[in-house]
Amino acid sequence: MATSELYLCAYSTLSQKQHDRDNQVMMPDSVVDDVLLSVKNISLSFGGVKALENISFDIRKGEIRAIIGPNGAGKSSMLNVINGFYHPQDGEVWFKGIRRNNLKPHQIARQGISRTFQNIALFKGMTTLDNLMTGRITRMNTNMFWQAIWYGRAERQEIEHRERIEQIIDFLKIQSIRKTPVGRLPYGLQKRVELGRALAADADLLLLDEPMAGMNIEEKEDMCRYVLDVNEQFGTTIALIEHDMGVVMDIADRVVVLDYGRKIGDGVPDEIRNNQTVIDAYLGVSHD
Amino acid sequence: MFYREAGEFKTSYPADQQIFPIALDRLGVKIVLVFAFLVVPFIIDDYWEKSVLMPFLVWSMAALGLNILIGYCGQLSLGTGGFMAVGAYAAYKLMTAFPDLNIFFVIILAGGVTALVGILFGLPSLRIKGFYLAVATLAAQFFLVWMFNKFPWFYNHSASGQITAPERFIFGVAITGPEAPPWATYLFCLTIVVLFAFVAKNLTRSVIGRSWMAIRDMDIAAEIIGVPPLKAKLTAFAVSSFYIGVAGAMFFAVYLGAAEPTEAFGIEKSFLVLFMIIIGGLGSIVGSFIGAAFIISLPVLLKNIMVGGLGWPTDIVQHLIFMLIGGLIVFFLIVEPHGLAQLWRITKEKLRLWPFPH
Ligand SMILES: Nc1ncnc2c1ncn2[C@@H]1O[C@H](COP(=O)(O)OP(=O)(O)OP(=O)(O)O)[C@@H](O)[C@H]1O
Ligand SMILES: [Mg+2]
């Protein structure tokens, strides 16, 4: 559980939007339970390279939390820590109010964290449908024997989950590429399928590593729309890495800024926009 | 316009998730099965059994197994011969220790034993990949053959060092032993192979099969989205070895009748099966059959034409066949890594449009 001090400070910086949402969905004084994930004093290094130094922040239920920073700042490493692919030398990860022990990535996925990758990591030889069905693996479970004869629970399960996957396919408007091997799809569509695969898990926390990188304006707008819709319609909490400041300032509820592995800013978009350290370290240096 | 898939609309997910969603495929499979089960047994003779049909069935089974491991799960193995030997020796020990045990269960249990051995030799795959894993399985190949030569317990201390299958019956008809009629051995193996081909098809289209393919295509991403790599890899080794063990058991007990490890289960058998799945198509169930049929029937066909028809010397024809198969493997590796199954798929796509290409 987050210390009350930490939470108070986070609460005082909530945006108006966040306030509204809190008032709608829960009692204002239940906000302590409102933290979905928090990282505390995370330090991670590779040999001599310090990728993350003493990083703490939290992600609240239902929000879009952006993580920004210049290249090599440690953003992707942070996501890798959150889903257990990297093990920090120091620090704690709390998820759903429980301190997490050393779990394997696939166990963490089962707890309700799913993600997309900076460089598309789809299963290239499989169809869109199979990629999405694989994304749902954390919710499927059948004895191999029944799968072998395709009968009873195994068959029922395939059909039941296929229905949910079809909803996601409709949502992302990828019906026409259902049976296409994803390796044959253009880049923008692959990014969308990858989002679909992450959505398929119906996870509580969705980590998106630069979902709009390399896209043209139209594709970016579509992707923004999907991210906002996922957040609003499914109520999914989202942690988003993105370089496009316009996008970040538009859709994020709160922003954490990393630079050379250190946290140099944390707050609502307006605060970040006006934070001198952030401007110096990031906004002033690279605009894109 | 002969072959249609686009024109067929599925109105429910169960219909779309049938084992063969396309009506023409379903018809094709039914025709092949009816022919194989109801026609062939009446026309089969000794020559067809020994030189074409039985080898085809045995090697199809082995190719199915190896394809699950390499084609679906992406774990390279050169231990096929060794695992077939495990199946064969397990069958032999079971037949001699439990004379009353039905031969069908002997074969299945032999597969089970091989699955356990497969898991054991699959353990390194949790740490090593690709080329290094191939070397580890190569070590398994040599170790297993050495082991079956070395310890007389495995061949019941027979003077020749060979294992010989005793006669076993199903419904009073001999399945093993020299008296077994061709139609009976054929039907017995056909039943097993067809049964497990459907099992393989089912496995590869459910949760477990998708985890295998996910590990094959991108193992790190697979683990991060929730595929347990340990379970996926070890089940692939287990299932694959089961198939290969069953193939080895049928090869020894039903087809050969007697075997000696170095000759019957050497490294060239590992390569033979590997070639089958490369030519047939990696990651394709039907490809396993196509590959086995191709590699089994090509030499028979060419020998009949060149030696029988044209009167060429046998040894030259033998070498020509080697060269041809080698050339084909290079061709498929470079031009069409998905093998004949993919060419077949492309043909079907063309046929769908024919005669109007647009
Ligand atoms: N597996 C690894 N081994 C060694 N160094 C690594 C590894 N992963 C990350 N690093 C280093 O950690 C630092 C942070 O990298 P990270 O990928 O987290 O940056 P990033 O903020 O995501 O950058 P970008 O915007 O370019 O994606 C870099 O210096 C990188 O070289
Ligand atoms: Mg990154």
Image: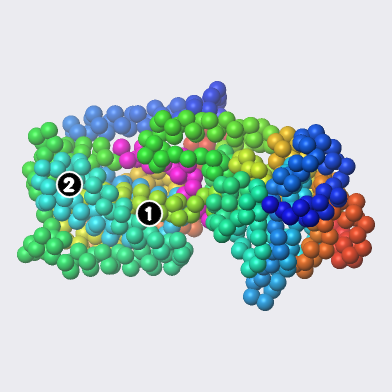
In percent of width and height, residue B77 lies at 38, 60
Classify mark 2: helix, strand or loop: helix
- From the image, tell me which residue sits under label 2: B254
User: Which residue is more in the foreground, B218 or B9?
Assistant: B218
Classify mark 1: helix, strand or loop: helix
User: Which residue is more in the foreground, A255 or B289?
Assistant: A255
- From the image, tell me which residue sits under label 1: B237
A183 left or right of A152? Answer: right
User: Which residue is more in the foreground, A249 or B2?
Assistant: A249
Q: Amino acid at mark 1?
A: Phe
**Where, quadrant-wise, is the C terminus of chain B in this rendering?**
top right
Q: Amino acid at mark 2?
A: Val
B35 left or right of A100? Answer: left
Q: In the rendered image, is residue B128 in sight?
A: yes
* Residue A114: image tag: none
* Distance from the alpha carbon under mark 1 to that under mark 2: 25 Å
The magenta-colored residue range is: B194-219
What residue is at 35 percent from the left and 52 percent from the top? B238
Label 1 resides on the chain identified as B
In percent of width and height, residue B99 lies at 10, 46
Q: In the rendered image, is residue A241 in sight?
A: no
Q: Quadrant of residue B259?
A: bottom left
Magenta run includes residue B217 = yes
Q: Is residue A112 above or below residue A153?
A: below
What residue is at 35 percent from the left and 61 percent from the top? B121
Label 1: few (<14), some or many (≥20) within 10 Å? Answer: many
Q: Is residue A171 above or below residue A135?
A: above
